[in-house]
Image (cartoon, helix red, strand yellow):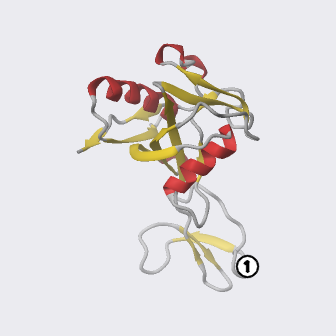
Amino acid sequence: MNPIEMNYCNACAGPLSSRIPRGEDRVRHVCEICGEIHYLNPRVVVCALPVWNDQILLCRRAIEPRRGLWTLPGGFMEQGESTLQAASRETMEEACAHIEVGELFALFNIIHINQVQLFFLATLPKPEFAVGAESLEVALFDAKDIPWDELAFPAIAITLREYFKARDSGNFHLRIADIHLDEEQKRVFKPFNFIH
């Protein structure tokens, strides 16, 4: 079953039906006129975890969803850019900050909303930042001052907790986990696998 409904073909504007095309193993949107098969694949969200002198740069969201809550700078990857470029661009858009993007730190498969979220470690070379178009406020936080009850998304809180554990232990290996909804629509977090 396709979680996203489409009505018309992007190629010819013909009506679409949902069915399993020949040679496929799952339901797809198929044009009844031209036969075009529309593949709806997960979207990639790229975030940075900018650090300056042990402080983390967070942005208070000015847009929905979760307006008014804090997040790491990030957003949907654009066509024609790399994941590193996306992390850098999103940080500039949301926090007006130049960063040096480092290694991939965490990867989440957010199955119930069809997203893959990537979190890159990043260095903020100078404490220079400002409110961007999608932010109400931007600030540096020490670990003890993180607004845990005001974080916008579960993956942000999990990533920050893992970062502080990694900083204390020196284990910065890539973390990979799944987040999904169970039958009762409760969020389920599958513990991290560590890639060495």
Residue situated in front as seen by the camera: 61 or 171: 171
Disc 1 marks which amino acid?
Gly
Residue situated in front as seen by the camera: 39 or 118: 118
Residue 43 seen in the figure: no
Q: Quadrant of the C terminus?
A: top left
Q: Position of residue 172 (x, y in %)?
A: 31, 36
Examine the image and state in which quarter residue 148 appears: top right
Residue situated in front as seen by the camera: 93 or 107: 93
Q: Where is residue 165 in the image (x, y as percent from the top left)?
A: 34, 25
Residue 86 versus residue 96 in the image, above or below: below
Residue situated in front as seen by the camera: 36 or 16: 36
Q: Position of residue 9 (x, y in %)?
A: 69, 75
The secondary structure type at the circle numbered 1 is loop
Residue 66 seen in the figure: yes
Q: Measuring 39% from the left and 24% from the top, which residue is drawn there?
A: 164
* Residue located farthest toward the top when viewing the structure as drawn: 144
Q: Measuring 68% from the left and 37% from the top, which residue is drawn there?
A: 65
52 vs 11, left or right, is: left
* Residue located farthest toward the left when viewing the structure as drawn: 196
Residue 77 versus residue 106 in the image, above or below: below
* Residue located farthest toward the bottom when viewing the structure as drawn: 34
Examine the image and state in which quarter residue 193 appears: top left
124 vs 133, left or right, is: left
**Circle 1 is placed at which residue position?**
14
Q: Position of residue 50 (x, y in %)?
A: 52, 36
Residue 7 versus residue 133 in the image, above or below: below
